[in-house]
Image: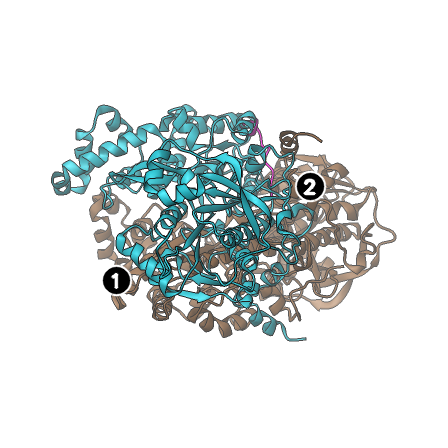
Chain colours: A brown, B cyan
């Protein structure tokens, strides 16, 4: 046996004991793909579902080829593809922030394409596609990345392909590498980009007049890419929320052990609160703020602060001087009065730029106050000095404030502290702040994400071999074995005004007040606030009986009878 | 079957799917305790090891009863205790910050004491002992807490029992509850307190003149309570470092996926860098700072900054514009020049308090600068404004700065950014900061910590039934089945000057430059800095082949042949 230090050196570069073991985990496949040991690509057939949005007519005009080809009809697998295409050259890329399971999409894609076709990796992301930075993915590559976390096999970036020059460069890449298809693994924006690319590359790309197929795969830890039962959840959400859930569970356990602190925990998720409600359902903390509810009820910042302060006071009366508050990252933009304040600040700073710049630092706040409407001046005056400084800080190139930089969790701590003191100065209130974000994007996938993404890859590969373009791969019925389906991307597009012009976009899915997950949360939260009823979901397990759990919010919203998922 | 929402309600209050399952995990016992299904208390006999410190003579004078009884001789288990005492009344308490496995110490203690003796829980910590807040721990309690994380079963606090009044109150508690023994689960300070209590309660506590036994159990996630092969590690360290290790591994994977950020991660650990070196060994990041090495080499802040900047520049030359830097929480106090600066600042602020207070805010820094020696004035001028503000902020009641409040990770980011720009302004450097601390104290114990603490509890219970007092329970030979031993607490005491007076303390174990773990780290770190050689240890597993891993630094330092531990 080698010495321990020799063993340690061998673990370097993705060969920890854990990483070596997860590579050997079996991957189940939906019944449609046949035997797990040798999955077969499937064909697709139309279902009775046709998708539409308020802007379907405009979409049909701007995406004539795609809409004519798909009719915006949802497809479902229709049997093994016995005459699967051969010799196809397919490129795959990651787009946007990383999420657990991306590697398994590539693994599934490679297995669906089989030995008769060639898979290329694009490095990194859309930028790599524009630059034509491709390499052939080998079976050995696949063996090394299966079931591992992160997007590091290919890297990713956030370039949006939008200028004519960029589209031309992508076309050049397709011609140069003689590509037949591109698979874009990304979120709402990236799948919108995939829809645009699919239309652009529909035909006439190559010498023989043929086009290049484009297939999207739904990724995002934020969980805001959801399409009812057709796409119950994007991949990466389960892993991220289980990582955050463990951390929140650990901290809850700490609050009841140390008996003296509140912890305010901000959770990643650009705008929607899916991550926050899922983590709340897993852990049952004292207070959870849901941005969409704040917007719906037109809550003021003061009322949110008061709501938390009342929980602090109510628990203290029972001798509980600790607790956890979950705060969604995007909260500020969902508080109507904050939006109004920020909009007026943007205006004032734009219209009085020179005068503002010439004021001494100590006088800048007073200067701005004097220009604001009374309501906004009052609101600004109620905020801690460091938040006022941030609100008056430099604008981005569009003249907008970068709201995401405001430390919402610290702002709430400071305001709750002041409010509690105002109501009853004898109540002890000590608090710590956390932001859980980057820790959750690149962890090793849960069994759910590992199986889901592998089957998304098999579905994407099958769509290519079946000659489809302009679809997003999906796997439905996740508690009943799994069914490969395809969603026509043009059926999801809406028109939104962004940066002063109309753009086609896939609408972000927000937490719905009437969803079963929200309703369950609302039915329990008063009890969670009143007493310590939390539980610890623990570290996600890859082996053993507890390993097979889907997200609680997804299970509730899809009417599943238990948390155990069933793929294969 | 109940509906999903019914199942969810049942999971509240520590009944997640995970928590329910870990309670059923088998707990191995050291061979000395017999069958795992029904462990038996053991007796102890003297070994040939006698402990001493530079202050042994003084200790013998101040702890005459304890030293005379133990002779500072280490004990080892010597067979099943066939005549174990009956009718003993034993109290157990947590002291200091929580750590994973504390509940299993209580479980082991209860099982060792068996049905013939009574175990009381003290709520919370030393404060509860002073107040006499005790309750009888039942078998049902034990079933509910086994293998769960946190100290929430009893709670904890940081009260140090030191005044005569406090000692008297503890004695009253012993009399009132007719206690025969107290088990203190805590770190270096708490075990020092246990030694003092053992001497104080040695005899004459109860009407019949008898005393109360006191046994310590070694806890701390910081890992700074270590006594060579007699105590290779305190409990909680393994769980905390595996939690931090997973997070750091996830973030490393993110750096290579997103390809554009450095992450500076501060790791909990009041002064020693054991946690940091262990996490580095698990994950292999680009740069790891070890406080003890900084002190040993008398490194300046500028040289630490330069060392990181050189790594940033060297990697950038290879196209790697990302990486991770691990920073131990206690770093600042190990930088000699910072210590000198802070000491002079404390003096200046104490001697010129009124003049300083009367200066306008904008002039305070200049005022202090004018009073400092040139070297310290230059160092202060090199620091970012927010750090200067903190360094000039209010002192604690002893006139000292709370060094732990300085955001070292942000300070390093800002100084590295400036240094990189100074050397080569074309090198991109974007960075995020993290502090991993509270997340790691109360997670569910790893299999290592679960087994280790259960056997520490069995050992502590056995020591009580064997009539011992003034010992710390330990389990050695963790890669060879485990041997219960006892360390005489008086053999560990040194005299240190704290707050202007001599105190007996157990010295904190620091990372040693010549330890195998440090030497292995030093032999590999240049390669880790030069290229991405990291690996992801993944979430700790409780089931499956990868679950049995001890800390890497502990395995290296104890000469183990592999990471697989062996208890039972």
What residue lies at 27% left-to-right and 68% top-to-bottom?
A: A423
Q: Which mark is residue A378?
A: 1
Q: Is residue B95 above or below residue B228?
A: below
Q: Is residue A470 left or right of residue B60?
A: right
Residue B533 part of the magenta-drawn span: yes
Mark 2 or 1, nearer chain start = 2
- Magenta-highlighted residues: B526-537
Label 2: how many Cα within 10 Å (few below 14, some 14–19, many 20+): some
Q: Which residue in the structure is indicated by mark 2?
A: A20
Q: Is residue B335 left or right of residue B469?
A: left
Q: Is residue A335 left or right of residue A207?
A: left
**Element type at mark 2:** helix
Instruction: Verify CB contact (< 8 Å) between mark 2 and mark 1.
Output: no
Q: Nearer the viewer, residue B431 or A309?
A: A309
**Element type at mark 1:** helix
Q: Nearer the viewer, residue B210 or B449?
A: B210
What residue lies at 35% left-to-right and 69% top-to-bottom?
A: A310
Q: Nearer the viewer, residue A18 or A220?
A: A18
Label 2 vs label 1, nearer the camera: 2
Q: Which mark is residue B259?
A: none
């Amino acid at each position: 046996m080698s010495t321990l230090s020799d063993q340690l050196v061998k673990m370097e570069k993705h060969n920890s004991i854990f990483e070596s073991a997860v590579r050997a985990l079996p991957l189940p496949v939906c019944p449609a793909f046949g035997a797990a040991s040798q999955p077969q690509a499937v064909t697709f057939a139309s279902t009775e579902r046709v998708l539409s949005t308020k802007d379907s007519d405009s979409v049909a005009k701007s995406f004539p080829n795609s809409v004519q080809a798909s009719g915006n009809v949802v497809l479902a697998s229709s049997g093994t593809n016995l005459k699967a295409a051969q010799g196809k050259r397919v490129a795959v890329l990651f787009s946007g922030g990383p999420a657990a399971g991306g590697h398994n999409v590539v693994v599934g894609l490679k297995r669906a394409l089989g030995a008769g076709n060639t898979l290329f990796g694009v490095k990194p992301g859309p930028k790599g596609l524009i630059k034509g930075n491709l390499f052939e993915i080998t079976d050995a590559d696949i063996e090394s990345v299966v079931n591992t976390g992160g997007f590091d096999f290919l890297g990713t970036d956030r370039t949006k392909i939008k200028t004519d020059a960029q589209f031309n460069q992508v076309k050049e890449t397709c011609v140069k590498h003689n590509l037949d298809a591109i698979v874009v693994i990304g979120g709402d924006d990236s799948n919108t980009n995939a829809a645009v690319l699919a239309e652009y590359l529909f035909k006439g790309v190559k010498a023989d007049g043929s086009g290049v197929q484009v297939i999207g795969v739904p990724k995002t830890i934020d969980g805001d890419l959801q399409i009812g039962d057709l796409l119950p959840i994007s991949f990466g959400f389960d892993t991220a929320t289980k990582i955050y859930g463990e951390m929140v569970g650990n901290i809850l356990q700490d609050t009841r052990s140390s008996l003296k602190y509140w912890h305010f925990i901000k959770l990643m998720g650009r705008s929607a609160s899916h991550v926050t409600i899922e983590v709340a359902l897993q852990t049952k903390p004292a207070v959870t703020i849901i941005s969409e509810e704040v917007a719906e009820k037109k809550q003021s910042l003061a009322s949110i602060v008061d709501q938390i302060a009342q929980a602090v006071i109510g628990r203290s009366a029972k001798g509980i001087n600790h607790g956890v508050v979950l705060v969604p990252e995007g909260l500020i933009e969902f508080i109507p009065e904050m939006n109004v304040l920020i909009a007026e600040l943007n205006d004032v700073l734009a219209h009085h730029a020179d005068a503002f710049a010439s004021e001494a630092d100590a006088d800048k706040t007073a200067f701005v106050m004097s220009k604001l409407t009374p309501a906004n001046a009052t609101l600004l005056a109620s905020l801690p000095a460091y938040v006022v400084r941030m609100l008056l800080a430099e604008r981005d190139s569009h003249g907008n404030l970068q709201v995401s930089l405001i430390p919402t969790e610290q702002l709430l701590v400071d305001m709750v502290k002041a409010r509690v003191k105002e109501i009853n100065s004898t109540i002890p209130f000590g608090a710590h702040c956390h932001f859980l974000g980057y820790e959750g994007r690149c962890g090793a996938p849960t069994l759910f994400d590992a199986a889901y993404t592998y089957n998304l890859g098999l579905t994407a590969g099958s769509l290519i071999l079946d000659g489809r373009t302009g679809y997003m791969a999906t796997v439905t019925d996740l508690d009943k074995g799994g069914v490969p389906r395809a969603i026509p991307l043009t059926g999801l597009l809406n028109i939104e005004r962004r940066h002063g012009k109309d753009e086609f976009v896939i609408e972000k899915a927000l937490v719905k007040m009437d969803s079963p997950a929200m309703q369950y949360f609302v039915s329990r939260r008063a009890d969670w606030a009143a007493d310590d009823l939390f539980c610890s979901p623990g570290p996600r397990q890859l082996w053993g009986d507890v390993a097979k759990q889907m997200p609680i919010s997804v299970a509730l919203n899809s009417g599943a009878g238990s948390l155990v998922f069933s793929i294969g």
